[in-house]
Amino acid sequence: MEESPINDPGKAGKQHEQQAQLAPKSGERPDQGTAPTNDHYRPDPQMERDQSSIPPPDVANAQYHHPVLAQPPAALTGLRLEEPAKVAAGITAVIKSMEFSWSEGGLSRGTRGLLNMNQKDGFDCSSCAWPDPDEHRSVAEFCENGAKATASDADERAAGPEFFARHSLAELSRMTDRDQNNAGRLTHPLVKRPGDNHYSPIEWPEAFQLIARELNALDSPDEAVFYTSGKVPNEPAFLFQLFARQFGTNNLPDCSNMCHESSGAALSPTLGLGKGSVTLNDIHEAEVILIIGQNPGTNHPRMLTALQKAKRNGAQIIAINPLFEAGLNHFRNPQDFMNPLRALGALMGDGTPITDLFLQVRVDGDMALLRGIMKHLFEAEDLNPGQVVDRAFIAEFTTGFESFEQNIRNTSWEDIEELSGISRAQLLEAANLLARKQKIVTCWAMGVTQQRQGVQTIQEIVNLHLMKGAIGKPGAGTCPVRGHSNVQGDRTMGIWEQPTKVFLDALGKEFNFTPPYEHGLDTVESIKAMYKGKTKVFFSLGGNLLAAGPDTEVIAEGMRKQKLTVFVGTKLNRGHLTTGETSLLLPCFTHADVDMQKSGHQMTSCENSMGIVSQNKGVLVPLPGQMMSEVAILAGVAIATLGNRTNIADWVAMTENYDVIRDHISRVIPGFENFNEKLRRPGGFYLPNGPRERKFTTANGKANFSTTELEKYALEPGQLVLMTVRSHDQFNTTIYDYNDRYRGIHGERRVLFMNRQDMAERGLHAKDLIDITSHFKGEQRTVEKFVAVPYDIPRGNVAAYFPEANPLVPVGSVAKKSNTPTSKYVVVTVAPAHKTVGAPLEVRLAAEA
């Protein structure tokens, strides 16, 4: 085997030495090594978690209690309504991509960023984690939202010390989230000292010493919280968890806790791995694809290309969602513009029809819907023995089938129809598409994971695949579609509050220390601990917990109680403004930035939704200033804080050459053996995946059927169920603009999508101003000055954008087992807006379209 590149720094990142024939081919079930031991969850996590309640905050009047706004300002920006789009992408997506790229990064810098994004010798898109093709990649291997993310990263504008000298924290908090992001790249380390209302410059050594002083003054390491964004690449993520554990805590909450934690909690005990089991080629080969609780046209636009290819190969697609999104209707592929045979159709036609059957499920009704489909399948099996249910697969590979079957058969059609909002006849259509097929792929996202019963719903997805034998074979399997670019990789690197003993033992052996074995705090537990004053330091590596988490004002109050808040980031966001007594704002590189260290141009790596690890090598020269890489920042903090409790020389070596980090990873984490060698292959490499090959690394070595409980919840008169969603001009908590053109929304974000009959019952008309109040265990939270928008959404359901609607989500309302906030099930009432005493009511609504 070739020696590690750490012994020859000249080898680091030499793309011309890569061999194309080493690229994995997904359709051939790629060589992925031996599956590791299972990553099952703690058996009864709820018993270990803080179940106490927190008093509901005064959401509506918070702006009068604190000069720095935690919520986006309530002033409206001007709503123009159009008919929702029926086609996604097309020439408009191309134009929008160019507009964003050139307006923020400039023509040369913006174009260079786009052409190197998602290329085998370029950098990984910093937005979603959708995989890149193993084989041929287009010269424009990006989508509209990827272009927006890269344009934002390539921003030529700088938010330096002069900017923060001009604007106090209170003034900055009154900017919209879009304008905060558009202020430019952070370029210098900044500090807000006790009593200050501005960030001011600080030198890096002093910043490191300040962090060290506060951390080392804690009574216990567990008084610190280390939060991570899914945008962080593998190498700094590994160092972050290493530092936290060498410091002495497993308090490592991350954005996974709020998005796909329910997926991991469901998949680990049933299949043995908390990740998906398909490759990109499996989607191309599938006969039937179910898309549940996901809006690929906005949140993962490149997925539409895979769905288009599947359709052209004969696949049928079932879309299950409360909203019929444009991307689930028709797709005009911008790549077709380069094909003379398809260019005219891509420009003028409706594109490729995506959905064959749309089931407009009620919010939180997916579990009942899945039971209805499976109940029909069992009835079809009764009529056609051995042709619908794969009993040979069940007998060889699974346990728990009899109990599961009885549970489905005993579920009444009345409950199924009432809870799902879908008729028995419609569910029969779906079952008929599946009955004789085994090459089935199911994709889901936060529309499922953030439900009350998100874990149990995903267990029913697994049940469907197991009864059909639709897993561990080409064209079949489970596909949780992750959000941020490396959110899956961060968990693989050990960013987890409940790590396995196997991982901790390996980490301790590699770095010669005894790690903490007690479980730490997840995101919800951290929010509660901060609010109750049980923690004193909050350290955020990327991300924006204030805008991503539930109960915005509870998070804000918790932040204010910290002695120190540390934010490592690339651009200003609202979370940087609601701070502890002292706060640091530390600027770091993006995926697109050239990272030069002592050994030369460095690369990092990311893991996508399908378990492929590939390189990330920036191409843009960073803006002038004092930005540092995430790796260098973490090394500086670790050396200053730990001193002789760690190997300082090793931290220096890891900073000077990231290959040293990867050599450590290769000896700690299964599947990363020869990490440096494999990362230099074009396209990267696949991690071990037992379920993909019918090797189920559960505790019993089998795939386990689940017997779930279908719970019914009654609403009081006038109550509705709210779900939070993204607009098309945002990614996660980053707001690029005020538009959501696929849903016909322009110039405004404070909107509530409502069923027309629900509006009529309340005497509401289009564009009426309303207040929204959430109800949870006798608690109430109210947000004011939203605009009612009539929309095609099931009766009894409403939808609003986050982060604007996050103050309505109670921190105590979580999914069972995963502890994920239930942002897809918030009980609310709606009333005409009233003018709060002493509050100006500024309304700038455009005339009717």
Image (tube, rainbow, N blue to C red):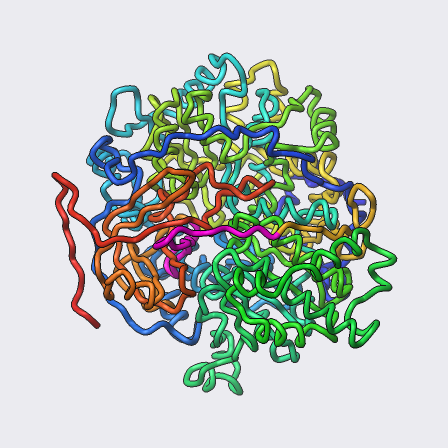
Closer to the camera in the image, 368 or 348: 368
Seen in the image, is 397 located left or right of residue 635?
right
Would you place residue 34 above or below residue 502 in this image?
A: below
Point out residue 740 in the picture as x, y percentages from the top left corner. 35, 63
Point out residue 556 in the picture as x, y percentages from the top left corner. 35, 32
Image quarter hosting the C terminus? bottom left
Closer to the camera in the image, 107 or 746: 746
Q: Magenta segment range?
A: 710-732
Seen in the image, is 412 located left or right of residue 403?
left
Closer to the camera in the image, 179 or 832: 832
Residue under the point 78% across and 67% down: 389
Image quarter hosting the N terminus? top right
Q: Quadrant of residue 474?
A: bottom right
Residue under the point 42% across and 23% down: 532
Q: Is residue 715 magenta?
A: yes
Can residue 409 be seen here? yes
Can residue 187 be seen here? no
Point out residue 164 in the picture as x, y percentages from the top left corner. 25, 35
Residue under the point 45% across and 62% down: 298
Q: Quadrant of residue 63?
A: top left
Would you place residue 597 above or below residue 805 in this image?
A: above
> Mainly helix, strand or loop, the magenta region?
loop
Would you place residue 79 above or below residue 183 in this image?
A: below
Would you place residue 635 above or below residue 744 in this image?
A: above
Q: Is residue 353 magenta?
A: no
